[in-house]
Image (cartoon, helix red, strand yellow):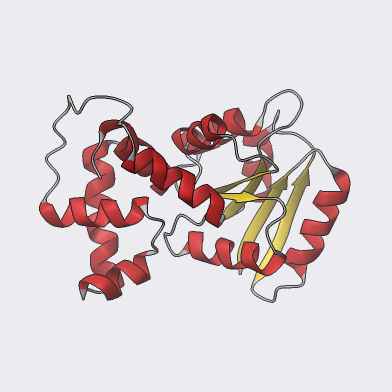
Amino acid sequence: MIRVALFDDNRQQRDAMAALLESVPEMSCVGCFADANSALEHAGACGPDVVLMDIDMPGTDGIEGTAKLRLAYPALRIIMLTVLEDDDRIFAAIRAGADGYFLKQTAPMKLVDGIKEVMEGGAPMSPSVARKVLGMVNGPKQEKKTEQFELTPREQEILALLVKGWTYKRIGMELGVTFSTVNKHVGHVYAKLRVNSVGEAVALAVRKGLA
């Protein structure tokens, strides 16, 4: 059972999302919250596996809430939800530690698939958002590559595929290795980059030109 918590200041959208989650046999909505001001306390109380975080909320916004949750709960999966495709906000959310990024107009079952994907180690995104992220990767680098992270060729290859939003399962199939082998390599990537999530790894890869 995948335990999901919602943070969204729009009650109608919260209720609709909660109903969607409860309609999926392998998912459970364990909490609905109108803001991220007490995100740490809420997450600690309801123990979600995945958080769906609205990016624009009064007080503590979704980006700040994501950063706090990532620091306190490194294993937590966080998917950002927004009505906007603003490049700066997308990149800020990924840098804060978001594992996925969906537009709110995404088809309900696509979002359900995204929740399943993020639990498998993927970085699910709406297609238009993914294109923007890839544009960041393929365009001018944000910073010069001044640090040496000593990634092996295989680790660099896997990091590049994570940047593309591929799941561990898909990476394993592409490279002809098992899920556990991919997971082991990703663990090494995290350790060398000093990050705790796919989102942070992708953000650093974009910023440093690693992929």
Quarter occupied by the C terminus: top left
Relative image position of residue 126 (x, y in whole percent): 57, 55
Closer to the camera in the image, 136 or 200: 136
Relative image position of residue 169 (x, y in whole percent): 36, 71
Relative image position of residue 118 (x, y in whole percent): 49, 59
- Picture residue at 54% right of the left edge, 66% below the top: 116
Quarter occupied by the N terminus: bottom right
Relative image position of residue 108 (x, y in whole percent): 71, 65
- Count of marks overlaid on the render: 0
- Picture residue at 64% right of the left edge, 34% below the top: 62
- Picture residue at 16% right of the left edge, 36% below the top: 149
Is residue 108 positioned above or below 136 on the image?
A: below
Q: Is residue 76 visible?
A: no
Closer to the camera in the image, 12 or 192: 12
Q: Is residue 63 visible?
A: yes
Is residue 2 positioned above or below 149 on the image?
A: below
Is residue 52 positioned above or below 192 on the image?
A: below
- Picture residue at 70% right of the left edge, 43% below the top: 83
User: Is residue 146 toward the left or the right of residue 120 in the image?
Assistant: left
